[in-house]
Amino acid sequence: MAVCETCGNDYDMAFEVHAQGAVHTFDCFQCAIEAMAPVCEHCGTKVIGHGVQSGEHWYCCAHCAREEGNKGIVDRVMAGTSA
């Protein structure tokens, strides 16, 4: 059995996440997200999808990035146009 590094649960179905040279042990995806997901710098939500990065800053969506003054960031590009 392995102990979840977020909640401390000793669980027989725990799993490891290998990221940036470190190994993390969790008992569920919720604990993994809580420990590893970046936080949107505008609204404070956990970024669990692709998110948007502008320089060293992370946002959950283009709207939040624009609210923080990052111009020209969109969530998607219209078909037939280049990004």
Image: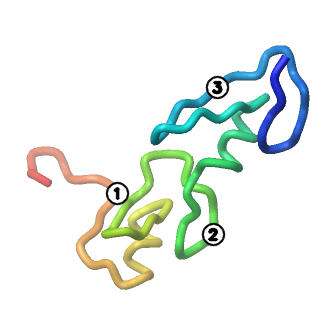
Q: Nearer the viewer, mark 2 or mark 1?
A: 2
Task: Pick the quarter of the image with the C terminus.
Answer: bottom left
Residue type at tag 1: Asp
State the residue position of label 2. Answer: 44
Q: Which residue of the protein is positioned furthest toward the front in this rendering? A: 21
Q: Local crowd at mark 3 within 10 Å, few (<14), some, or many (≥20)?
A: some
Residue 73 horizontal side relative to residue 81, left or right: right
Q: Nearer the viewer, mark 2 or mark 3?
A: 3
* Above-or-below relation of 61 to 1: below
What whole-number distance in Å separates the C-alpha atoms at marks 2 and 3? 26 Å
State the residue position of label 1. Answer: 75
What whole-number distance in Å separates the C-alpha atoms at marks 3 and 1? 31 Å
What residue sits 34% from the left and 57% below the top? 75
Dot 2 falls on a residue whose secondary structure is loop
Q: Are marks 3 and 1 in contact (CB under 8 Å)?
A: no
The quadrant holding residue 24 is top right
Residue type at tag 3: Glu
State the residue position of label 3. Answer: 16
Percent position of residue 10, x then y:
90, 26
Mark 2 or mark 3: whose residue is earlier in sequence: 3
Dot 1 falls on a residue whose secondary structure is loop
* Above-or-below relation of 42 to 82: below
* Above-or-below relation of 56 to 9: below
Q: Which residue of the protein is positioned furthest toward the bottom in this rendering? A: 69
Closer to the camera, 16 or 73? 16
What whole-number distance in Å separates the C-alpha atoms at marks 2 and 1? 18 Å
What residue sits 88% from the left and 38% below the top? 8
Mark 3 or mark 1: whose residue is earlier in sequence: 3
Percent position of residue 15, x then y:
69, 22
Residue 33 horizontal side relative to residue 7, left or right: left
Q: Nearer the viewer, mark 3 or mark 1?
A: 3
What residue sits 59% from the left and 30% below the top? 17
